[in-house]
Image: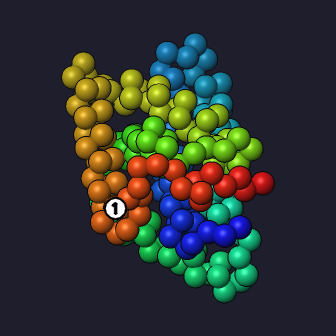
Amino acid sequence: MNLRDDQRVEIALPARLIFGVAVCNCFGPDPEAPDQEEAKREVAERTERLVRLLQRANVEPFEDLHDKGRRKVAARIDRVAEAVAADFDQQPAVSIALSLFYFLQDLLDRGVLELNEGSSFAEAMTEIFIPAMEGGLRAAATLPDDEERIDRAAQRRAAKLLKRLQGMGYYRYAAPVAAAAVHFR
């Protein structure tokens, strides 16, 4: 695979950021589920599967490299993830997850990133994360005005995240690059 290191970072970064939220175990059951205990078990199983898939997705973009190259790209991903994650300090995990949902949705909508069928990231996003986030806003809202307020704040944080990453040299293009279309299986 002929990818530049920055392309590998762009591919791995969303998985890395979402992994940070998934390990916080912030996903909850549907408050309207008839059997809350069963709903909690299902959420725990989905979260565990999400974590496993994201662990795999974190390394897929650079697993074809030699050891030195892998370490170099992994360290770069770590540095970028840590730098942007600092902007989320002191935010509730569900708010961070929703912001990452909007960030990912923007990348997908503009064709900057593609979810390739069969990849660990695509499976994690289409089967677990995106469906959870689409229903998560309702669950996070405790007051009638909360849903809109939480939603607007998450969209602002997603835009700020993208702007910060673009300032660091990532995701500057509006059309997909070859790196985004790579299938990692």
Position of 78 relative to 156 (above/below): below
Residue marked by disc 1? 166
Answer whether residue 18 is visible to the viewer in this image: no
Answer whether residue 79 is visible to the viewer in this image: yes
Most extreme residue toward the top, as rendered?
34
- CA neighbours of label 1 inside 10 A, class few (<14), some (14 to 19), many (20+): few
Residue type at the position of mark 1: Gln
Location of residue 181 in the rendering, given as x and y in whole percent from the top left corner: 63, 51
Q: Is residue 81 left or right of residue 19?
A: left
Tell me which residue sits at (74%, 44%) in the image: 118
Q: Nearer the viewer, residue 59 or 25?
A: 59
Most extreme residue toward the bottom, as rendered?
68
Position of 174 relative to 123 (above/below): below
Location of residue 146 in the rendering, given as x and y in whole percent from the top left corner: 25, 27
Location of residue 33 in the rendering, given as x and y in whole percent from the top left corner: 55, 17
Instruction: Give the number of marks.
Output: 1
Tell me which residue sits at (71%, 67%) in the image: 1
Tell me which residue sits at (51%, 38%) in the image: 27
Location of residue 105 in the rendering, given as x and y in whole percent from the top left corner: 45, 39
Q: Is residue 141 left or right of residue 48?
A: left
Per the image, label 1 sits on a secondary structure element best described as helix
Colouring chosen for the image of the structure = rainbow
Q: Is residue 175 left or right of residue 60?
A: left
Q: Nearer the viewer, residue 43 or 98?
A: 98
Hey, which quadrant is residue 85 in on the image? bottom left
Quarter of the figure with the C terminus: bottom right
Hey, which quadrant is residue 58 in on the image? bottom right
Tell me which residue sits at (29%, 48%) in the image: 159
